[in-house]
Image (spheres, grey):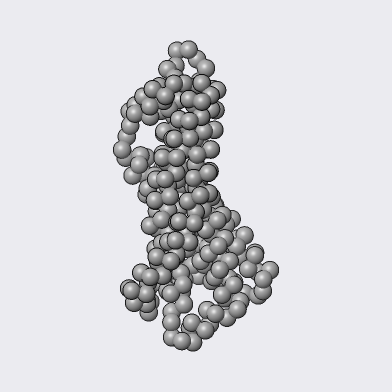
Amino acid sequence: MLEHFGKYLLFMSSLFTRSESPRIIFNRTIDEAILIGINSIFIVAIVSTFIGAVTCVQVAYNLNNALIPRSTIGFMVREMTILELAPTITSIVLAGKVGSSIAGGLGTMQITEQVDALEVMGINSSSYLVLPKVIAALFMFPLLVIISMFLSIGGGFVAGTLSGALTSQEYITGIREDFIPYNIVFALIKSIVFAFLISSISSFRGYFTSGGALEVGAASTTAVTNGVIAVLIADFILAQLLL
């Protein structure tokens, strides 16, 4: 484990040695942002909407005490969404979609010797291929998390009002109650950390793939597994440090 961690640190440091020109990095980052962010909006929207709806229905099921105001349902949906569901669940979903794509793409380039061709041409392949992916992830993950927050709270609103668990006014009152703006900042900090972990770990696994097509599949699976574990560990550490 220590050997792999040291290799990972050396790999990350290589991204900033013999870096390509800012114009090339910028153009590559835009392309990666489309692949990472724009192409992930649909799956994030579906997951977020239904997570918000299910959360609202389940909270309403458990809060059946007449002494508890129904607006508490909206309050709990908001808090659960902002603090945990939107940043963490979205990142786990993206670890599967984006992480496997990054690892698979780099792994395929490695076994077909495209990475070696870049090195022969005098290009720092790790900086050219990986750095734009990391930068794009750092920008796009927070935006996807913000979208997830809105859709999850909106999904809870639709599910709560259609099921008759509470009225629209009660839900709106709940999501406005005792709002703490720092929770949004905390969620965005988490999304940035998760973005770095997922993109860098997936790139590391894909970049050092060797063998054939079977090893590319194994690298993608390992990248997703390691990314999800890293997200969960970082989630706990950030909660302890920042809350």
Write the residue at 51% across / 66% down. Answer: 203
| Residue 22 drawn above or below residue 233 | below
| Residue 53 drawn above or below residue 24 | above
Provide residue 101's location: percent of width, then percent of height.
55, 62
Instruction: Report whether residue 60 is seen.
Output: no
Provide residue 227's location: percent of width, then percent of height.
53, 56
Q: How many marks?
A: 0
For the C terminus, the quadrant is top left
Residue furthest right in the image? 214
Write the residue at 44% across / 21% down. Answer: 167
For the N terminus, the quadrant is bottom right
Write the residue at 57% across / 81% down. Answer: 113
Provide residue 54's location: percent of width, then percent of height.
54, 33
Write the residue at 48% across / 83% down. Answer: 119
Instruction: Report whether residue 113 is seen.
Output: yes
| Residue 150 drawn above or below residue 68 | below
Residue 179 as seen in the image, left or right of residue 191: left
| Nearest the eye: 100 or 230 | 100
Provide residue 239's location: percent of width, then percent of height.
42, 43
Residue furthest left in the image? 181
Residue 193 as seen in the image, left or right of residue 226: left
Residue furthest front in the image? 162
